[in-house]
Image: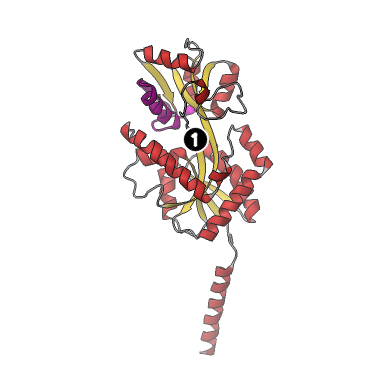
Amino acid sequence: MKALLAAVACAVGLASGALAQPYPARPIVVIVPASAGGPTDTIARIVAERMGAALGGNVVIENVGGASGTIATGRLVRSPPDGYTLCIGGWNHFVVNAGTYPNLPYDFVKDFEPIAQLASGPQILMSRKSVPAANLRELVDWLKAQPMVTMATGGVGAPGHVSGISLQQKIGVNFQFIPYRGSAPALQDVVAEHIDTIFEQTSTALTQIRGGTVKAYAVTANTRLALLPDLPTVDEAGLPGFHVSVWQGMWAPKGTPKEVIAKLNAAVVQALADPRVKARFAEIAQEVPPAGQQTVEGFAAYHKAEMEKWVPIIRAANITPP
């Protein structure tokens, strides 16, 4: 009996010791709902590496592609809320999917714990080089005068597709959307003058804009890009308020302890303040979000506002999953 009691006491002591271990006591897995090498994956790896140093532990990236990222978000919602499984995803995964997949068994606002916004990148409205418009106002007039205008997208429901839907509603035109398997081949067909227009992120478009193989009219933000300081904002060019940001953020499963969320948030904020992280973001045309959106509360409010803005637009357009 004494031996049995001693064994029980030992087990209880070991369990208590394990529970008392400071977080994180083992590697943290960060699910990325995209393949390796893409923008979301690149941002995730930059931030995760610096977070690992701040937390004093390993932060491991696991790419979980498929079904436009819903396989990954479905896995996150089913994970234990202990801070050891997180997700770094984008506007397309946590906003657009809410509109294109209305029957998912989870809610993108209610069933995840926001940690922080990580990065943002506005889009650029461009056309083939031979379009006669010299600025955005002239482009809008030209679009309205055409019986049909083609717009390339990186796929059905891709950021450029959603931006195009929003633009046609704003200016009263109808685009013929041409979906591609990714933004790179879509842009190549604009360069080749097979397609009229495209919305694209700076990282993909920069070389073509600088090379003069396309016309760039405006950036979908209220501030100019450091990499393209001569390109006006939509506000300056004649479409005030037409802001579209392809942003990335970090989430945990619902019910993750507040102290764990706070520790993760502090690690993200520390990472985003690191000059090396800022420099690497600049290389891929990503911007560090405002300080208010790096907080848990600020990011939660921003995510909710983006849902309220974009989900009705997506559902009204009847975008269905590819």
Disc 1 crowd rating (10 Å Cα; few below 14, some 14-19, many 20+) is: some
| Model colouring | secondary structure
Percent position of residue 36, x then y: 53, 39
State which quarter of the image contains the C terminus.
top left
- When the figure is inspected, residue 103 is found, relative to residue 4, above or below; the finding is above
Whether residue 298 can be seen here = yes
- When the figure is inspected, residue 147 is found, relative to residue 223, above or below; the finding is above
Magenta residue span: 155-184
Percent position of residue 77, x then y: 42, 52
Q: What's under tag 1, amino acid-wise?
A: Val
Whether residue 68 can be seen here = no
Instruction: State the residue at coordinates (61%, 51%).
Output: 267
Rendering quarter of residue 70: top left
**Extreme residue in the bottom direction:** 1
Q: Mark 1 points at which residue?
A: 246
**Extreme residue in the right direction:** 275
Q: Which of 5 and 288 is in front in this view?
A: 288
Q: In this view, does 172 lie to the left or right of 197?
A: left
- When the figure is inspected, residue 184 is found, relative to residue 72, above or below; the finding is above
Q: In this view, does 312 lie to the left or right of 203?
A: left
